[in-house]
Amino acid sequence: MAAKPALPGRQRRRLRASRLAQYALVQVLIAIACVFVLHQSLPQPPAGYLVNAFNTKEGGTERGVTLPHYTSSRFSMNDPPLYSGHFVWPSSEAQRAWSVYLPRFNNGVEVAVNGVVILDSRRDPAANRPDRNAPEIAVIPASLLHEGENDLAVRLFVWGPLTGFLDSIYAGPDPVLRPYYEQRTLVFVTLPVVFSAWQAILAVILTIMWAVRRHEPAYGLLAAAMTLGVAQAFLPTAADQSQYSRLNAILITSAPLESGFVLTFATLFLGGRWPRFGALIFAPGVLLVAVGLFGDQALISEFFLFVGVPIIGLYLVLLALIVARSVLKRHDVASFVLGCAVTIVLTCWIRDMLSVLQIAPDGRIFVARLSYSALLVAIGAGLTWRFARALNQVDGFAGRLVTQVRQAEDKLKASFAREEERARAAALALERTRLMRDLHDGLGGQLVSIVALSERGEAGAPIGEAARAALKDLRLVIDSMDDIGGDLMLALGSWRERATAQLRPHDIALDWRAVSPQGLPVYPELRPWHVIQIVRLLDEALTNAVKHARARRIMVTIETLTDASGAYGRISVEDDGTGFALTPDGAAAAAGQKAARGLRNMRSRAARCGAALDLVSTAGGTRVRLTLPRRFPDSDAAGA
Amino acid sequence: MTELSDERPSQAITVLLVEDDAPTSWRLQDALAKAGFQVTAAATLAEARACLTESGPKVLLTDLQLPDGHGVELIRETRRRFPATEIMVISILGDEESVISAITVGATGYLLKDAFPTDIAATVHELVAGHSPISASIARFIVRRTQNHPEPAPGPPLDTVRLTPREIDILWGIAKGFSYAEIAGHLGLSRQTVPGHIKNIYRKLEVHTRGEAVFEALQQGLIRL
C-alpha cells in the first residue's frame, strides 16, 4: 500500500471518524435491506386449499386450534400431539392427484388421511434438521379419498431443543401445491446443499493452502471451520439412536467451534495479533463437544440452544468489530466485503433469535445458517481477490526484477569498462615509471654529461644543443605518457615551462594568454599520442619562429570557442618575425626549405589528431592557428 | 634575471653540491661559482656527510642516485639536523618519481641538470629568497593525487590530505601553465603570497612518519630501549 501522507493528529482523527461513520452507515443500510427482504413472506398456495382448523390432543387434553400452532412441550416423542382436521375433496377432482403440503413443522410429522399414514417426515434426514425449514409434500392415494369431507390427522413429534411448531397445512391438487413445495425446497434444501458443496471446495483449497504455507495458520483455521461446516451439513440429525449418533450429535453441535475458528481466522487474516487468551475462544466449542461426548440427547440440545447459539451471536459481534477495525485501518475491498457479509449474517441471526424467543414469530423460518453462505461467498471472494493481488504483485516484482537486473547489468558493464580503462591507465603509468627510471639511469645521464662536456669547449656548442634537444624530447615523451584525464591544459602547462626555458637564451619573450579561465575544453577521449602530436606541432611552430623568422616576441593564445554543435579549443602561436615565405637570398632559401618540411610535418600531425591547421605568414609575422576537433579520433587516421 | 644574479652579493651563501657525474658536477660548480656562491662539491654520500659535520650549508643541492647510497637519506638527515638549510634535488628529467620522493623528505624543488647556467644561479637565488620553485608536471602529479581514486596510483606515496582547497587551486593553476600573477588574479590573491603558499605546500607534503618520530626521540635520548 502506498505510504500515506502524515497528517496532523486532529485531522487524522476526523478522517477516521468520518470513515467509521461511512462504514457504519453502509452496514445499517445492508441490515435494513436484509430485514426488508426477510419480511417478504414466501408465496402461499391459494387460500381455498388451506386447512387450519384442527382439534389437538396434547398431554391428554383436547382443544380446537388454528394453525400455525406452537406446542408447549419441547419433547414429545412418546406421546406426540395429534392434530385432527378435515378437508373437502370434490369427486370432480378425480382427474388429478391430490396432495397434502406442509410448508413448515418442528421437528417431525406423521400425516394420515382417513386413518392411513401417507407421510412420515422422520424418514427424511433433511426434514429432521430444525434449522433447515424443510417442507414436505405427500400425494394422497386416490383410493383413500372420498367425496366430501376427508379426515386429516397429523402427529407432531418434538425432540427439542425448541418447542413444536406446525404451520398451516394445505390439501389440494398436486399440480397446484407442488410448485410452492418446490420453491421452498429450492431455497431451504437445495441451496444449502449447493453452499455446503462450495464450503467443501473451500475446505479443500484452504487445507492445501495451509499445507503449503505452514507459516500462515489463518488458512488452517479457516480450513478447520469449513470442514466442520461441511460435516454439519451432510450428517443427519441424530433422531434415532444409530451407531454414530453420538458423533453426529457432536458434529451438529460444533457450530460454536466453527464460529470460533472463523473468528480466529479473521483475527489473523486481517492482520491482527493473536489475542493473549486466544485459546479461550475455543472453550465454549470444546465444552459443547465434551457435552456431546458424555451427555445425553436432551442435555446436548439444551446446551446447544442456551450456550452454543448465544456464543455464535457473540462471535458474530466480535467478528463484525474486527472486520470494521480492519476496514478502517486498511480500507481494502476484501475487508469491506467481509464486513458486509458479517452484517448480513448478524442481522439474520438476530432475526432468528427473535423468532426462537417468539418475540417476533415468523413462521419459524430460520435464515442464519442460510445467510452464512453470504460469509462463505465473501471469504471465497476475499481469498481470490488476495490471490489475484498477490499474482499482480509477483508480476510487478518480476518486472521490477527484470528492470533492476538490466540496470545492474548496465552498471556492471559500465563499471567493467571503467575498470578496464583504469587498468589500462595504471599499466601505462607503471610502464611510464619503468621507462623513466631506465631513461634516468641510462640515456638521460649520458645526455647530461654530453651537455656538460660540450660546454667546456667552444666547438662543442652544436653537440650540446643537440644533446639538450634530445633531453627536451625525452622529457616530452615521458610527460605525454602521463594520464592527464583529457585536460590538454595540463600538457600545455609543461610545454610552457619547456618553451620558456628554450626561449630564454634567445631573449625571446613568451606571451601566454588563456582567454577563458579553464583554457580548453576537456576531451575524455584524449590519448597520449594525441598529446605528443599536438605538443610536437607547437614545438615545431616555436622552432620556426626562433630559427627562421628571427622573432622577438611570441604570443600563445588558448581559447574555447562555441558554435551550434558544441565547444572546441583553439591554440594560436603568433610571432613578430619576418615570415618564412619571403626569403630572398639562398641561405634563407635553405632555411625556407627546412621550414617547408617543418610545415609539412605540422600539417600531418594536425591531420592525425583531426585538428585543422591554419597558417598565415607575412612580412610582419607568422600565425599558426590550430583548431582542435570536437572529438579526437580513436585511431591514428594518417598511420604512424 | 642574468644581471640580477650577477649583481647580488652572494659571498655569504654556501652551497653543498652532491653529484657523482664529474662533468655535470663541474658544470654546476661553474655556474654557481660564477654567480658568486661559495660551493663545496661532494661526489658520494660519505663525502657529503663529512662536509655536514660542523655546520649546515645555506643550500644543499643533491643528486639522488649516488654511488654509496640514495640522495633521499642525505636530504632527510640534513633536514633534521639543519632545518634552516634549503634543499633542492638535481634531476635529469624532472620526473615526479625522483622529485616527489625528495619533496616528501624535505626538499623544496628541483634543478634540471642541463639547465642553462644563468637559470641555475637564478633558481638557487630564488630558493634562498624563500621562493620554492615548482614545475607544472610536479604540480600536476600532486593535484592528481588529491583526487580520490579507489586504488593508489603508481609512483611514490604522497599524502595530500593536509592541503587546503586554496593550495590545491594554486597547484591546478601551476599545472595548467598559468603564471603566479595569473593564478593570483584568478584566485583573488596578492601576487606576493603565491610563493609562500607553495612553500607551505612543500612543508605539508613532508612526511613525518611514526618511525621517524621514534628515531628522533631515540636521538634525543627521550626513549631508552
Image (spheres, rainbow, N blue to C red):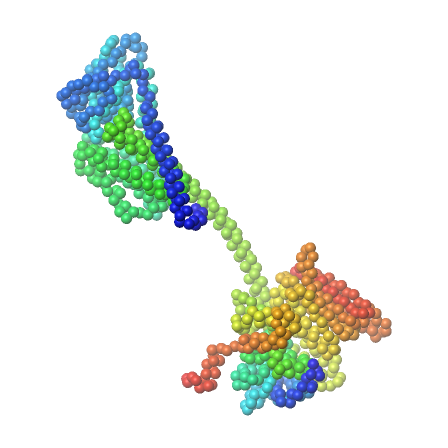
Residue A181 locus on image (x, y percent): 31, 21
For the C terminus of chain A, the image quarter is bottom right
- Viewer-proximal residue, B105 or A415? B105
**In-image side of A257 versus B105 (left or right):** left
Residue A141 in view (yes/no): yes
Question: Splitting the image into 4 quarters, where does residue A318 fall?
Answer: top left
Q: On screen, B202 above or below A168?
A: below
Q: Identify the residue shown where x is 35% and y is 41%.
A: A323
Question: Residue at 40% across / 44% down in the picture?
Answer: A14
In this rendering, does residue A258 appear at all?
A: no
**Horizontally, is B55 left or right of A472 in the view?**
left
In the picture, residue A345 is in which quadrant?
top left
Q: Residue furthest front?
A: A10
- Residue nearer the viewer, B189 or A472: B189
What's the residue at 61%, 72% (across, down)? Answer: B189
State the residue lying farthest toward the right.
A585
Q: Which residue occupies 57% across, 75% down?
A: B201
> Is residue A45 found left or right of B116 in the rendered image?
left
Whether A444 is drawn above or below A83: the answer is: below
Residue A474 image point, x, y percent: 67, 74
Which image quadrant for residue A242? Answer: top left
Q: How many labels sit on residues?
A: 0
- Judged left or right of residue A181, residue B136 is right
Residue A611, image x, y percentages: 71, 62
Q: Position of residue A350 (x, y in %)?
A: 29, 33
